Amino acid sequence: MSEVFESIKRGLEQALEHARGNDEIAIIHKPKPVTPIDVKKLREKLDLSEIGFANALNINLNTLRHWERGNRQPKGPALALLKVITERPEVMSILSQPLMMVVRGTTPEAVYSSSENAVFPSVQSTL
């Protein structure tokens, strides 16, 4: 039989043995534990305010504060992004740039304001 078939057969035999409770033949792969990231230390190293960092990551300010206090840990895509930023801080220059978006009846300058709780002018009247 082919080498590929033999490899698949061996894997299936190991899976059956594992299901029967025999882990001697089975090769069990355990994921490495995720190293926690000190989010506050990272933000301070980047010399960013809480608001600036939260905006760059497109997360809620309260979420950032929970991470920084250690009440919660970033997970999934947020954790992956923070790891990239830790290894390659220059990524923040891209993330910190305002997103260009089209809002009917506004200019790009009106879409982004310097206020912390900016609301799009065209939407403000409906809130």
Image (spheres, grey):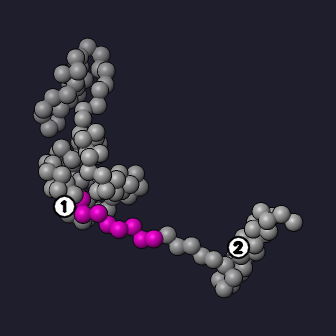
The relative height of residue 126 versus residue 42 in the rendered view (above or below) is above
Residue bearing the label numbered 2:
15
Indicate which disc residue 61 carries: none
Residue found at x 49% / y 69% = 31
Q: Which mark is residue 41?
A: 1
Tag nearer the camera, 1 or 2: 1
- The quarter of the picture where the C terminus appears is top left
Whether residue 21 is visible, yes or no, is no
Q: Is residue 55 left or right of residue 33?
A: left
Question: Please, what is the three-letter code of the amino acid marked with disc 2?
Answer: Ala
Q: Which residue is depicted at the point 29% across and 63% down?
A: 37
Frontmost residue, 120 versus 49 = 49
Q: With 13 as the anchor, is 90 left or right in this view?
A: left
Relative to 113, does residue 8 appear above or below in the rendering?
below
Look at the magenta stretch and give its main secondary structure: loop
Please state if 113 lies on the left or on the right of 64 as rendered.
left
The amino acid type found where label 1 is placed reads: Lys
Task: Please provide the residue range marked out in magenta.
Answer: 32-41
Q: What is the quadrant of residue 75 in the picture? A: bottom left
Give the residue at x 42% y 71%.
33
- Residue placed at 79% from the left, 65% from the top? 3
Q: Position of residue 113 (x, y in %)?
A: 15, 29
Labels 1 and 2: the sequence-earlier one: 2
Location of residue 118 in the rendering, given as x and y in whole percent from the top left corner: 18, 32
